[in-house]
Image: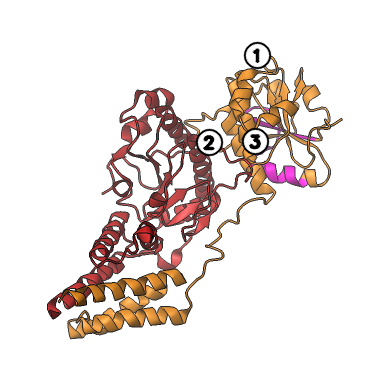
Chain colours: A orange, B red
């Protein structure tokens, strides 16, 4: 039942009665940013294909070419085993409400089990109707400012797509902490600290006497606290050497 | 140093040399969706205020009214103690690269300790320049599809704002080990970097010519990457001053 053009392994994003072609194109771009390419369309207001959508989608036009067109929502989700509806407003429907993060984790889990998952996005102006939401298994609620909820269609697609990408782990590690950096070894930091201390002793920096000891400790403590690379250490040696050389040449 | 109109407790979002007024307005809306209202602007291309920004911001116009305008990046971040730069492309600058999630957790932790945090967003077309990034402490990399990275300015603001909102849902102080530290503000680090750069220019350190530019950026990048306290900055000024004075007295 799944279209041959659709890749398995990702959720389908279903735009329900979208209005402006530009917004369909922007939604395609938002999806493709996160490696999602299964778009489905329910009764786009201005017909299909739509040249405004194509113009806006530049770079993600392939998603529009492959988009599956349906006359109504039941047709669009007929092959799906689990359906999320996105909504900005609270509804009085009895239905699980989950965050985008939790939803995309659930989606990843279900897809890994061989299920077919869809996410519904409503028309720009009014959002999904209760009749649409009644066909979903769960509601995705984006945690926006209650005093100002103004996500547009592509932005809503973007946030859910972003969470999909996070859920499947195809993400940059939370922090690379500069992986691969050529960090200075302690002995190099020690030599750097000694170099500065020696020159500063000569220069009479550690003054007055009763403060000299704590000044030396503070300076050494600073070098040790810094996340210094080998290149930093070389540069800092060069800085001191050059200043000394410059002033020495001056006389 | 912080503007009286700015609310504490959230990061400032700094739009660096933004081009279209519409995008500034859209960024304001994206911010306010997640309760962020501290916008700063660096040299907007079309001047300020900008009627196109106001028209687009509808509902979030207050952010534009309160936005702090600066002629250059150092001025915009002068009071900040920790600065993130958003970037789509990998850079060859030695600097921690973190996900939006990790970044906003770090930001929440630091803000809870009383620090002032900023996030930089580059111009629409080209993004931040290396010279801008050299003034940040860390880089935020959004995990987009490597084959298709097409986030616009407001979308990038939206994703980072979304992660801010998620982060303050469950804040764990990130760096308790130095809570209460009197961290240097960016303006102080800027002055320190200028002090060293000026003396080193005089001393002929930036040589040969074809390497001079990248040497300057590397040095500035190092200062921004270091977790410098106010006391460190004073000490490093003193180091340079004393070496220059010493050698000058020698003749």
In the picture, residue A173 is in which quadrant?
Answer: bottom right
The first of marks 1 and 2 along the sequence is: 1
Query: Residue A31's x, y, as percent?
Result: 65, 35
Q: Residue furthest top?
A: A46
Q: Earlier in the sequence, mark 3 or mark 1?
A: 3
The residue located at (43%, 45%) in the rendering is: B128
Nearer to us of marks 1 and 2 is: 1
- For disc 1, the marked residue is A46
Say which residue appears at 78% left-offset and 44% top-offset.
A110
Residues under labels 1 and 2: Cα distance? 30 Å
Residue A194 x, y percent position in the rendering: 34, 83
Residue labelled with disc 3: A31
Assign the C terminus of chain A to one quadrant of the image.
bottom left
The residue carrying pointer 1 sits among few (fewer than 14), some (14 to 19) or many (20 or more) residues within 10 Å by Cα, namely few
* Drawn side of residue A40 relative to residue A224, left or right: right
Q: Nearer the viewer, residue A153 or B137?
A: B137
């Amino acid at each position: 039942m799944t279209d041959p053009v659709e890749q398995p392994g990702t959720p389908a994003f279903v735009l329900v009665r979208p209005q402006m072609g530009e917004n369909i194109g922007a939604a395609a771009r938002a999806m493709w940013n996160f490696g999602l390419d299964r778009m489905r369309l329910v009764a786009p207001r201005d017909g299909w294909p739509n040249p405004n959508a194509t113009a806006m989608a530049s770079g993600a036009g392939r998603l529009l070419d492959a988009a599956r067109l349906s006359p109504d929502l039941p047709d669009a989700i007929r092959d799906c085993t689990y359906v999320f509806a996105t909504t900005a407003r609270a509804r009085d429907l009895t239905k699980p409400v989950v965050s985008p993060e939790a939803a995309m984790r659930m989606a990843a889990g279900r897809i890994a089990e061989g299920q077919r998952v869809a996410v519904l996005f409503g028309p720009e102006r009014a959002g999904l109707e209760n009749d649409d939401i009644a066909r979903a298994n769960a509601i995705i609620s984006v945690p926006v400012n209650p005093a100002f909820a103004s996500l547009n269609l592509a932005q809503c697609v973007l946030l859910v797509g972003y969470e999909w990408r996070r859920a499947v782990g195809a993400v940059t590690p939370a922090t690379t902490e500069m992986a691969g950096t050529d960090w200075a070894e302690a002995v190099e930091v020690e030599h750097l600290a000694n170099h500065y201390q020696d020159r500063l002793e000569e220069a009479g920096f550690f003054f007055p006497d009763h403060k000299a000891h704590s000044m030396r400790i503070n300076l050494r403590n600073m070098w040790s606290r810094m996340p210094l690379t080998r290149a930093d250490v070389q540069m800092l040696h060069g800085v001191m050497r050059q200043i000394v050389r410059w002033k020495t040449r001056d006389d």
